[in-house]
């Protein structure tokens, strides 16, 4: 797991790229358990971003992304590719 201190060294663009990479991995997962594990990682990265002061003025966007991923995680939605396209 990456630390907050290390995560804060990444630009917002790089942070989003890492989150997008996890979402892509989740969309390609071969089973539901693997998908959920990768989604947990993406949500963890989003939580790190929310703790980063760089996102203070843009937190609504990242919170919306977290909400959309949480809906996929609990089975309320399945639109990972749509979420990925929005990033």
Image (spheres, rainbow, N blue to C red):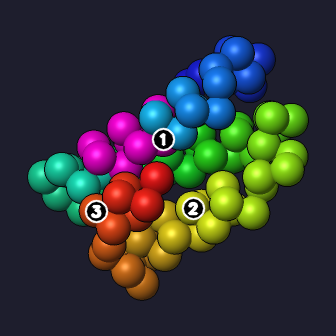
Mark before the other along the chain sequence, 1 or 2: 1
**The furthest residue to the bottom:** 76
- In the drawing, does residue 85 fall left or right of residue 62? left
Residue at 37% over, 49% down:
23
Could you give the CA–CA distance between mark 2 and mark 3, rounded to whole angstroms?
13 Å
Check residue 12 for magenta coloring.
no
- In the drawing, does residue 43 fall left or right of residue 6? left
Could you give the CA–CA distance between mark 3 and mark 1, rounded to whole angstroms?
13 Å
Residue closer to the observer: 19 or 26: 19
Q: Indicate the quadrant containing the N terminus: top left, top right, bottom left or bottom right.
A: top right
Q: Which mark is residue 19?
A: 1
- SS for dot 2: helix
The part of the chain drawn in magenta is 18-25
Residue 37 picture location, percent across and down: 38, 48
- SS for dot 1: helix
Could you give the CA–CA distance between mark 1 and mark 2, rounded to whole angstroms?
10 Å
Mark before the other along the chain sequence, 2 or 3: 2
Above or below residue 65? Residue 17 is: above
Residue 28 picture location, percent across and down: 18, 50
Whether tag 1 and tag 2 are in contact, CB under 8 A, the answer is yes
């Amino acid at each position: 797991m990456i630390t907050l201190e290390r995560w804060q060294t990444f630009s917002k663009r790089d942070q989003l790229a890492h989150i997008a990479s996890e979402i892509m991995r989740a969309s390609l997962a071969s089973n539901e358990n693997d998908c959920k594990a990768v989604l947990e990682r993406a949500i963890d990265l989003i939580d790190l971003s929310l703790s980063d002061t760089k996102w203070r003025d843009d937190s609504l966007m990242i919170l919306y992304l977290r909400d959309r991923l949480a809906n996929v995680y609990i089975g309320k939605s399945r639109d990972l590719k749509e979420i990925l396209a929005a990033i």
